[in-house]
Image (spheres, grey):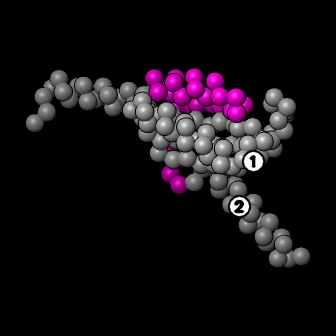
Amino acid sequence: MVRTSQRSALQLKEREMALYEHIFLARQDLSQAQVDALAATATEIVEANEGKVTKTETWGLKSLAYKIDRNRKAHFVMLNIDAPGSVVEELERQTRINEDVIRYMTIRVEEHEEGPSVMMRKNERDKKRRSDREERD
C-alpha cells in the first residue's frame, strides 16, 4: 500500500518527466560513423541524467535551404526523449559546445509519434518512386 505522501511524490515526478523531440544538424564533412557517435553521445547525456531516449532516427545527408557556416548540406538526426527539463538544458548546453553540430532544436511534444517519422516515410516514398521510374526506363 502506498502512502499519500509517497503517492503525491510519485505523481510529482511523473509530471516532471516530459516528452521532447531533439533534432540536430551535423556538418556535411562528417562520416556516418561520426554522426552516429554524436547521437550516441546525446543519448549518454540523457541517460546519465535520469532520462531516456525512446527512438533515434538518422535522416541522412540533406540539402539546406541556405548556407549555415559555409555548409550547403547537413546530416539530420532526431531523438525522441522522455526526461525532465533539466536534462534537456544539459543536452542543449553540450550540443552548443560541440563544433560538429551546426544547428539544433528541442521541442516539447504531447506524445511521440509511433513508427517512423514523417521524414522517414518521405524517404521511403521517394526511394519507391525512383525505383518505379527506373523500371519504366
Instruction: State which tag comes first along the sequence, 1 or 2.
Output: 1
Callout 2, which amino acid? Arg
Does residue 118 appear left or right of residue 13 in this picture?
right
Left or right of 13: which side holds 54?
right
Q: Which residue is mark 1?
A: 61
Q: Specify whether 103 is left or right of 37.
A: right
Q: Residue drawn 70% across and 29% down?
A: 99
Question: Furthest residue to the left?
Answer: 1
Give the magenta range: 86-115
Amino acid at circle 1: Leu
Give the residue number, with chain letter if any, for mark 2: 125
Q: Position of residue 33 (x, y in %)?
A: 65, 49
Give the farthest residue toward the bottom: 136
At numbered mark 1, what does the secondary structure look like: helix, strand or loop?
strand
Q: Which of 107/95 is in front?
A: 95
Looking at the figure, which quarter contains the N terminus? top left
Quadrant of the image containing the C terminus:
bottom right
Residue 136 visible from this viewpoint: yes
Which residue is at a point 47% across and 41% down the rendered structure image? 53
- Badge 2 marks a residue whose secondary structure is helix
